[in-house]
Image (cartoon, helix red, strand yellow):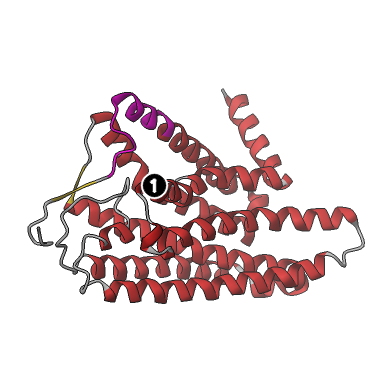
Amino acid sequence: MANSSSITHFLLLPFSGTRQLQLLHFCLFLAIYLAALLGNGLIITTIAWDHHLHTPMYFFLLNLALLDLGAISTTVPKSMANSLRDTTDISYAGCVAQVFLFVFFISAEFSLLTTMSYDRYVAICRPLHYETLLGSRVCLHMAAAAWACGFFHGVLHTANIFSLPLCQGNAVEQFFCEIPQILKLSCSTSCLRELWLILVSACLYFLCFVFMVVSYVQIFRVVLRIPSQQGRHKAFATCLPHLAVVSLFISTGSIAYLKPSSISFPSLDLVVSVLYSVVPPAVNPLIYSLRNQELKDALSQFITGCFQKQ
C-alpha cells in the first residue's frame, strides 16, 4: 500500500513481455510517429507557405495539426523509449506532465473540431456573411478560446487527479498515464470528485457534439439542394473529412473514459487508447489531404518547389 506522497514513479503497462515484441512495438510506434510528424508538418508548412490557403478553414486546420503533433508527442516517445530500454518506469513529475499535456491537447482539439463545424456551416449555409462572421480577428479569438479551454481542462483534471490519495500501488495499466487508469489506484471513497469532473466534461463534450450534428444537418440540407453535381461534390469534400475525424475521435474517446469498469480489460483498454490517442494524429493529415483537392494541389506545388530548389 502506498499514498501519493510516497510515490516517486509509476509503472506503465508494457505491450509485451518478450523482447522481440517490445522491439516490434518500438518499430511500429516509430513508423506511426514519423508519419504523424511528416503529415502534420507538411500541412502546417504548406498552409503557412501558400497564401491561397490563408482562409479560416485552413487556419483552423493548421491549429488542428499543431494539436495533433502535441498530443502524439506527449505519449508515444516515452512509450518507445521504454520499449527500447526494456523498462516501464515513468517519474511522478513525468506522469503529471503527461496527464496535463494530454488532456490539454485533446480538449483543445475537440473544441477546435467544434469550431471547424461552425466554419463549415457558415461557409455553406451563409456564404454571403462568411467574411463578416469569420473575419481574421474572430478566427484568432475562436482558436485562442479552443487552446484556453484545453489549458483550463488540463489544469483542472491534473490538479484534481493528483490531489487524490493513491493507495493501490503505482502500476498504471496503460502505456501512458491515463486518467481512468490512475483513478483505479485511488482509494474508492476518494475518487468521486474526479468522476464527477469527468461526467461534467462528458456533458460539455456531448453538447459540442450536438452542436456539430445540428450544424451538419443544416449543411446537408443545403448541399442536397445544390443543382450542380460538381458543387455538391466540392461541398461534401470539405465536410466529410471533418466528420470522419470527429467520429473516430468521439467513439474511441467515449469508450476509453465512459465504459463501465466491469468490461475493463488491459488488452481492450490498450487497443482503445491507441485508437484515440495515437491513430487520429497520424491519419488526420491523410484524411484531410485525400478529400481536399485544393490542399492536395498546394502540397504538390510545395513539394515540387522544394525539389526544384535543390
Residue occupying the point 25% across, 51% down: 172
Q: Residues within 10 Å of mark 1 (few under 14, many from 20)?
A: some
Quadrant in which the C terminus appears: top right
Q: Nearer the viewer, residue 182 or 47?
A: 182
Q: Main secondary structure of the magenta part?
A: helix
Examine the rendered structure and indicate whether residue 14 appears above or below residue 227: above
**Is 60 positioned to the left or the right of 293 in the image?**
left
Quarter of the view holding residue 156: bottom left
Quadrant in which the N terminus appears: bottom left
Could you say where residue 93 lies in the image, as x and y percent from the top left?
18, 53
Q: Is residue 229 magenta?
A: no
Q: Is residue 59 visible?
A: no
Quarter of the view holding residue 157: bottom left
Residue tagged by mark 1? 270
Residue type at the position of mark 1: Leu
**Is 124 positioned to the left or the right of 260 in the image?**
right
Could you say where residue 173 lies in the image, as x and y percent from the top left?
29, 50
Mark 1: secondary structure: helix
Quarter of the view holding residue 19: top left
Q: Is residue 292 visible?
A: yes
Q: Nearer the viewer, residue 308 or 25?
A: 25
First to last magenta residue range = 13-28
